[in-house]
Amino acid sequence: MEFVQPIRERKKIDAMKKLLKGSNIRDYVLFTLGINSGLRVSDLLQLKVADVIDEKGRIRDRITIREKKTGKTKTFPFSDTVIKALREYVPNLSTGSALFPSRKGRTPITRQQAYRILNDAAKVIGVKDKIGTHTLRKTFAYHAYISGVDVTRIQALLNHSSPRETLRYIGITQDELDDVYLNLNL
């Protein structure tokens, strides 16, 4: 199994969103929800339209899912970015369908199709690192860490067993840790 990397540059994230939105709104929402939730692709792909809209047809501000891998229930709020993306996308779907439907409509795209979508878009915008479906989750965690969120909180969000595992997972290198010593200069 090859290890994939987060998308570290904000400009690359913005370019990816622009490219995906221009080609297929479904793919844009998959990417946007993935990098803003930290969900595994298996959990993203099992979502139904009814999971993100309430009984009045409005976008929910929070979602509760049962994680496929762990069986644990996870509840989290949607960011403004996710709500905006969903508002553009959901009105075009039927309530009972998969949130990320294949061409046939009722079933979701496959993990392999999600991989192709993300990998192809990353190549177009010039991402050189290995990219895969786990890149979404890693990008979420990496940018949370870079923005100052304590690693133990990220560890809890990802259900990791230790902060060290989380740092390794998001690709924080020894050089980046050494920079703390070199740049602090108190």
Image: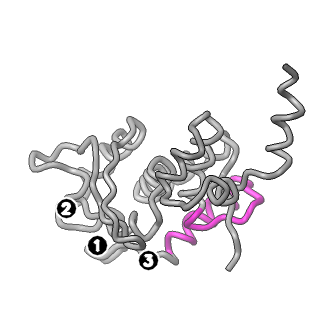
Residue underneath mark 2? 94
Residue at x-position 34% and y-position 65%: 72
Q: Is residue 145 left or right of residue 20?
A: right
Residue 122 magenta-drawn? yes
User: Identity of the amino acid at label 3?
Assistant: Thr
Q: The N terminus is located in which quarter?
A: bottom right
Q: Where residue 105 is drawn, which disc sits there?
A: 1
Identify residue type, mark 2: Ser
Circles 1 and 2, Cβ within 8 Å, touching? The answer is yes
Q: Residue furthest top?
A: 186
Give how far across and how far down residue 144 sits, in percent: 57, 41
Location of mark 3 (residue): 110
The magenta region covers 113-134
Residue found 62% across the figure and 42% down from its top: 145
- Disc 3/disc 1 C-alpha distance (Å): 12 Å
* Amino acid type at image mark 1: Gly
Secondary structure under tag 2 reads loop
Q: Is label 3 in a helix, a strand or a loop?
A: loop
How far apart are the alpha carbons under marks 3 and 2? 19 Å
Q: Residues within 10 Å of mark 2 (few under 14, many from 20)?
A: some
Whole-percent x and y of residue 6?
65, 55
Given residues 38 and 85, the one toward you in this image is: 38
Q: Earlier in the sequence, mark 3 or mark 1?
A: 1
Whichever of labels 1 and 2 marks the residue nearer the N terminus, that label is 2
Q: Which mark is residue 39?
A: none
Residue at image location 84% in from the left, 19% down from the top: 186
Residue depth check, mark 3 versus mark 2: number of the one nearer the observer: 3
